[in-house]
Amino acid sequence: MSIQPSRQSNFSLGLRARALFMCTLAILLSGCQDGPMYALKVANPYYSWREWGEDEKIGVTDHERRKQLTVLAETAGELSPEKQEFWAQQLNKLIETDQSPEMRRLAVRAASRMEVSSAMAMIERGLDDGSLKVRMEACQALGRRPGDDAARMLVATIGTDTDLDVKHAAMEALAQHDSPISRDALKFALADRNPATRSLAMESLRDVTGENYGDDPQVWIAALNGEPTEEATPRFADRIRDIF
C-alpha cells in the first residue's frame, strides 16, 4: 500500500511532462510566440540573427532558418535603411559561405528588395553562383531593378552563361527593361538557332516595345531596324492578357 501513492505521483508527473512537451512542440512548429520567427516579424533583426547563432548550438533545422529567411525576402523592402544595412551585411556573408543553394537563393531575393548600395553587388554575385536556381533568381532580381546597369548584367548573362534556362531567365527579365540595351540584345537573340530562344525573344520584345509583328523573327528584325512592316493581328493569348 505504501508504494501506490508513489506510482500515482510518477504517473501524474509523466502526464505533466508529456503535456509540457506537446505544448513546447506546438509553439516551435507554429512560430507564432517568441523565437526568431516572431522577432523577425516585429522587425527586430538583431535579436533574430543572434538567435540563429544560439539555436545552431542546439541543432536548429535548415527548415526553420528557411522560414525566417523567406519572411525577410518578402519584407526586406519595408525595413528602415538602418535595418536594411544590417541585414545586407548578414546576407552578404550568407551568399558567400552558406552551403545551401536554397538559402543563397532567398538571400539574393531579399537583396533584390533592398535599396542599400550593396544590394546590387549581392545580386551580381548571385549571377556567378554554382547553383542554377540561384543564378535564375539573380536574373529575376535584375528584372525588378531599374536602370541600365541591371540591363547590362542581364545582357552579359545571356552572352556568357552556359545554361539555357539561365539565359532564358535573363531574357524574360530584360522584358521589364524598356531601353536600347534590351532591344539590341533581344534583337540579336532573334537569330539564335534554338527555336525556343527565338520565340522567347519575340515574346519579350512584345513586352518591351508594345508592338506585335507576329511569329517571324525576320519581320521583327526588319521592324527593329526601322524598315516598314505590318503589325500582326493580336493573338488570342495577347488579347486575353490586355483585357486582364
Image: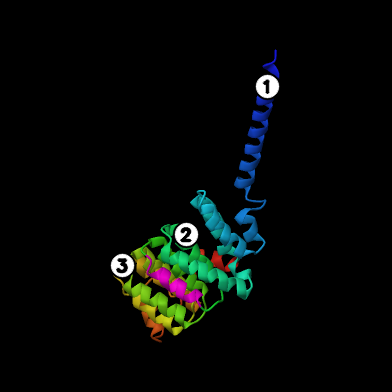
Asked if the residue under mark 2 is in contact with the one under mark 3, i.e. CB atoms within 8 Å, the reply is no
On whether residue 188 falls in the magenta region, the answer is no
Residue stretch in magenta? 118-129
Q: Residue at x 61, y 75 (%)?
A: 81
Q: Earlier in the sequence, mark 3 or mark 2?
A: 2
| Residue 26, above or below 32 | above
Q: Residue at x 66, y 37 (%)?
A: 20
Q: Residue at x 64, y 45 (%)?
A: 27
* Residue type marked 1: Ser
Q: Earlier in the sequence, mark 1 or mark 2?
A: 1
| Mark closer to the observer (3, 2) | 2
Q: Earlier in the sequence, mark 3 or mark 1?
A: 1
For this rendering, which residue is in front, 63 or 198?
Answer: 63
Q: Residue at x 64, y 34 (%)?
A: 17
Badge 2 element: helix
* Residue type marked 3: Thr
Can residue 147 be spotted in the picture?
A: yes
Q: CA distance from mark 3 to mark 2?
A: 23 Å
User: Tag on residue 6?
Assistant: 1
Outermost residue, top direction? 1
**Residues packed near mark 1 inside 10 Å, few (<14), some (14 to 19) or many (20 plus):** few
Query: Is 44 on the left-hand or right-hand side of 187?
Result: right
The residue that label 3 is drawn on is 162
Q: CA distance from mark 1 to mark 2?
A: 51 Å
Indicate the quadrant where residue 96 lies.
bottom left
The residue that label 2 is drawn on is 103
